[in-house]
């Protein structure tokens, strides 16, 4: 009888990538499949046909030093908790049998090796080797990351672009971001992140075993995105000095960051801030097969002492003082991942908060979560993980104290400002979805913030009030402030008593970073007004661009008004923190309803100079699945009101969702301002 041997194994890449919804990873050399679902390999045999009565096939599957030996049967029936390999008995070819390998629904994520072995009756053996990458499977109802609707899976797993929301709750900035999970080298970098983690280095066997659990995976990734405790991906920097790296505002996607980290031998990439940390984590989680979305919490409290109170101090002339370790971040960005939570009580499945920005240690390491959103809403601070910290971020009270000559002149409490808006990108559309009600019990559907969702329009007004027993003061921005234009605002003062008053009025404006207390005052005004009994007086004021453009750049402004009753010495304050909206780049694509994969298209990127002085800069255009690399164009000096149009050729490829993002950013060299724009492009498969 002739010898029977295995000539080679065909991994049937095209068929498997399609059936496992991993065809976006087609550029990688490895076969990428999802757990809990069978994938097909074909064995090319040599010598003679396979005889199931005298021969048998076995597959050894290996992850590190862990392994399972699986006999190949002719039965499809299988348990979802065990490895299984079978030949479909209908129409099989004994010279080239097709073998289906099915992993357990709780198999560990990682890069596997396998060995196909044929044994003959006389004891002879023949081997062939192969590799595959196994990911979580949100399409499988038994997987811990199963998410039930196809549009959710498209958005939270397959979509390789999105929006990050920044600025302030009243004046949102939508920042385009390319998650880049299908770009060359990104999948490999994400898997390498698990391999270089401290947990893997400490105990490889336990790490491989624990990788079946999305709770474990998410905590590893949360810690590895920052570099505080390990060779993590990003180094944080909240100063104004980025000379040793790249300013966080300059990143447009995760791919450049992850590739740079991998190519440097896992040296931290400089630099990141909260939205960069969160966006890169979103990429890693989507690559691993865990549904993930980026979430912004506006007016996010950083409560360092756990008392659910944030103290803010002001001088008697309206200057905000740096007297507390606690702080309010105008916005803070984290991620949510979807998973079941078998490690806590029932009812906590679904979205879980994870925060890779290094703020507080969890289990001795800079990571945060997964904290069930349902537990945060119901103040279940007794459950895992880090719920008290996240709860304070969205629910802390603010105590505002005015100090004068070392004494407390005034005290007030605000229970609504923290967590005033929590949002993420809407499914399938480039707009905001308000998810505040998932985190806290909102007063009504038309609560203060919900009714102000149109705040990004030019006609919106932003208003804050202060009150004492004798005086009301209202501070209102007349419209959403725009860079290059005066900041117009109104101060309305109400005398609540039947006696006249003489009041000192102090106005103060300071520049600030989104996560810190303000710097020195850059504009102030002081005066005295007389109020008749029960009189209402309205002051119309402006901060001219010349006062703020040198200090604010892309920062925010803290504006405060303090009234002092000259007779009673009673003080009252109203304040507002706001950002200056930047102009937008306009992107137009010719024949945008008939864009076909692999055929060249033209986009036109346009910019109109809204400033009162000439500007110049560098235009950068990027788009995963549209451009193979970033394109840069130098923009010559552009006069006020002048327009520039830059044509950009691109050739789209087709990936799972068919929707790509073309994004452009213009860095103005003489202003330290970056202006951005994006265009969603729908690509049809020819």
Image: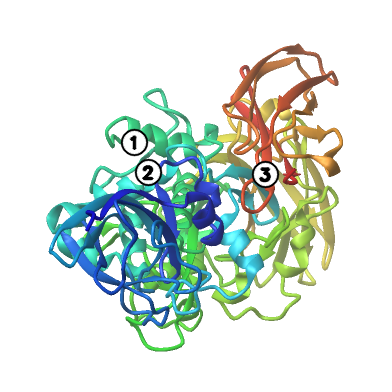
| x and y, in percent, of residue 217 in the image | 33, 62
CA–CA distance between discs 3 and 1? 25 Å
Residue nearest the viewer, comparing 338 with 175 = 338
* SS class, disc 2: helix
**Could you say which quadrant of the image residue 308 lies in?**
bottom left
* SS class, disc 1: helix
Q: Is residue 3 above or below residue 349?
A: above
| x and y, in percent, of residue 146 in the image | 50, 73
Quarter of the image for the C terminus: give it: top right
CA–CA distance between discs 1 and 2? 9 Å
Asked if marks 1 and 2 touch (Cβ < 8 Å), the reply is yes
Q: Specify which label sits upstream in the sequence, 3 or 1.
A: 1
Quarter of the image for the N terminus: give it: bottom left
Q: Specify which label sits upstream in the sequence, 2 or 3.
A: 2
Q: Specify which label sits upstream in the sequence, 1 or 2.
A: 2
**Left or right: 498 in relation to 10:** right
Q: Which residue is mark 1?
A: 262
Q: Is residue 183 above or below residue 100?
A: above
Residue reaching furthest to the top: 636
* SS class, disc 3: strand
- Mark drawn on residue 188: 2
In the rendered image, is residue 465 in sight? no
């Amino acid at each position: 009888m002739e010898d029977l041997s295995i000539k080679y194994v065909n991994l049937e890449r095209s068929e498997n990538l399609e059936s496992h919804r991993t065809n976006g990873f087609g550029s990688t050399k490895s076969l990428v499949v999802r757990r809990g679902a069978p994938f097909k390999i074909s064995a090319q045999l040599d010598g003679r046909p396979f005889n199931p009565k005298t021969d048998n096939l076995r597959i050894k599957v290996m992850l590190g030093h862990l392994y399972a030996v699986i006999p190949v049967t002719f039965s499809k029936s299988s348990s979802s908790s065990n490895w299984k390999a079978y030949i479909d008995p209908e129409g099989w070819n004994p010279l080239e049998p097709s073998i289906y390998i099915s992993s357990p629904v709780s198999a560990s994520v990682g890069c596997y090796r396998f060995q196909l072995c044929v044994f003959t009756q006389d004891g002879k053996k023949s081997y062939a080797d192969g590799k595959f990458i196994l990911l979580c499977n949100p399409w499988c109802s038994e997987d811990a990351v199963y998410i039930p609707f196809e549009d959710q899976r498209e958005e939270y797993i397959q979509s390789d672009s999105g929006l990050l929301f920044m600025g302030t709750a009243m004046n949102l900035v939508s920042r385009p971001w390319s998650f880049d999970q299908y770009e060359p080298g990104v999948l490999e970098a994400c898997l390498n992140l698990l391999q270089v983690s401290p947990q893997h280095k400490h105990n490889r066997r336990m790490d491989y075993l624990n990788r079946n659990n999305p709770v474990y995976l998410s905590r590893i990734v949360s810690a590895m995105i920052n570099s505080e405790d390990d060779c993590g991906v990003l180094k944080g920097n909240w100063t104004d000095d980025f000379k040793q790296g790249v300013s966080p505002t300059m990143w447009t996607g995760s791919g450049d960051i992850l590739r740079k980290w991998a190519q440097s031998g896992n040296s931290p990439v400089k630099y990141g801030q909260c939205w960069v940390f969160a966006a890169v984590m979103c990429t890693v989680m989507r690559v691993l097969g865990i549904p993930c979305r980026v979430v912004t919490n506006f007016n996010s409290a950083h409560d360092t002492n756990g008392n659910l109170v944030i103290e803010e101090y002001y001088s008697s002339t309206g200057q905000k003082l740096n007297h507390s370790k606690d702080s309010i971040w105008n916005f803070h960005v984290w991620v949510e991942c979807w998973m079941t939570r078998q490690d806590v009580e029932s009812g906590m499945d679904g979205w879980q908060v994870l925060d890779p920005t290094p703020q507080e240690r969890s289990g001795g390491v800079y990571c945060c979560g997964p904290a069930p959103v349902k537990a945060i809403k119901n103040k279940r601070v007794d459950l895992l993980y880090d719920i008290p910290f996240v709860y304070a971020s969205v629910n802390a009270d603010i105590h505002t104290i005015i100090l004068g000559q070392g004494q407390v002149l005034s005290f007030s409490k605000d229970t609504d400002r923290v967590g005033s808006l929590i949002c993420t990108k809407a499914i399938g559309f480039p707009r905001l979805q308000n998810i505040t009600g998932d985190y806290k019990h909102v007063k009504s559907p038309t609560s203060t913030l919900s009714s102000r969702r149109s705040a990004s329009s030019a006609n919106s007004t932003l208003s804050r009030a202060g009150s004492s027993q004798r005086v009301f003061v209202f501070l209102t921005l007349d419209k959403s402030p725009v860079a290059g234009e005066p900041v117009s605002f109104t101060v309305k003062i109400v005398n609540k008593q039947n006696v006249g008053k003489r009041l000192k009025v102090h106005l103060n404006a300071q520049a600030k970073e989104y996560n810190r207390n303000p710097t020195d005052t850059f504009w102030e005004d002081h005066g005295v007004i007389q109020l008749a009994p029960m009189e209402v007086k309205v002051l119309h004021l402006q901060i001219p661009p010349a006062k703020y453009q040198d200090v604010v750049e892309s920062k925010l402004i803290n504006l405060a008004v303090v009234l002092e009753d000259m007779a009673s010495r009673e003080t009252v304050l109203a304040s507002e923190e706001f950002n200056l909206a930047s102009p937008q780049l306009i992107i137009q694509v010719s024949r945008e309803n008939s864009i076909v994969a692999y055929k060249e298209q033209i986009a036109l990127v346009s910019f109109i100079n809204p400033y009162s002085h000439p500007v110049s800069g560098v235009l950068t255009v990027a788009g995963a699945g549209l451009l193979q690399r970033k394109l840069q164009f130098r923009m010559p000096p552009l006069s006020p009101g002048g327009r520039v149009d830059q044509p950009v050729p691109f050739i789209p490829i087709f990936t799972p969702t068919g929707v790509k993002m073309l994004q452009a950013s213009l860095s103005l060299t003489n202003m330290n301002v970056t202006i951005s724009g994006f265009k969603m492009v729908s690509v049809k498969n020819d």
